[in-house]
Image (cartoon, helix red, strand yellow):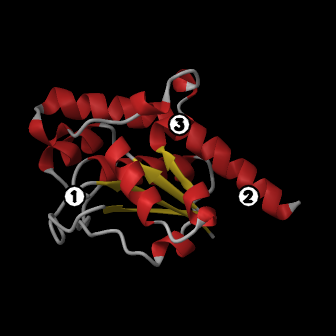
Amino acid sequence: MYRIIAVCTGNICRSPMAEFMLTDAFSKAGLEDDVVVDSAGTTGWEAGNPIDPRAAARLTEAGIDSDGHRARRFESEWYRERDLILALDLDHYRVLREEAPDDDARDRIHLLREFDPDTTDTDLEDLGIYDPWYGDASDFDATYRMVDGAVGGVVSYVRQELDADVA
């Protein structure tokens, strides 16, 4: 089983959106038995809380169910247990890399938007997804579009990783 975790600050907006969008994409790609996606926050500020209603509404609009989500904090053992760690913004990326136990773990940490084919020439510093929590529905639409732009690239990357494991 290939394991992916999406990470933002509180695990109520960006990372659960990425989790559910990726899960949906892997299911549509026929990889639901090979890949599992979850999410967490770099902080425990929102631990136990459901997904932000605005994020849930945007996912529902896309036909993606997010019921049952509960925010949680990223745990250090997940560095070993996850094959791909996707940070949603630069501060998450930096915290995860700083706290990673070794180079192997650091090598599995990426900004989600690194997988967006439209950002291949974009500096890493410009690949973060800002926190929509402070905004309105349009900010959640923007987050959805940025996550969506990377989903296909993540699916392709993981498919190549799975194929390489079989070879």
- Could you tell me residue 104's position as x and y percent? 63, 64
Mark 1 element type: loop
Dot 2 crowding, Cα within 10 Å, few <14, some 14–19, many 20+: some
- Image: 45 above or below 77: above
- Could you tell me residue 93's position as x and y percent? 41, 50
Dot 1 crowding, Cα within 10 Å, few <14, some 14–19, many 20+: many
Residue 33 appears in view: no
Q: Which residue is mark 3?
A: 114
- Image: 15 above or below 69: above
Q: Which residue is mark 2?
A: 162
Judged left or right of residue 133, residue 151 is: right
- Could you tell me residue 70's position as x and y percent? 23, 68
Residue shown at 28% from the left, 69% from the top: 73
In three-dimensional space, the C-alpha distance between marks 2 and 1, rounded to whole angstroms, equals: 30 Å
- Image: 145 above or below 42: above
Q: Out of 144 and 77, give the one closest to the viewer.
A: 77
Mark 2 element type: helix
Residue 31 appears in view: yes
Mark 3 element type: helix
Residue shown at 35% from the left, 68% from the top: 74
Residue shown at 46% from the left, 51% from the top: 86
Q: Give the quarter of the figure containing the C terminus.
A: bottom right
Name the mark on residue 10: 1
Residue type at mark 1 is Gly
- Labels 2, 1: front one: 1
Judged left or right of residue 98, residue 139 is: left
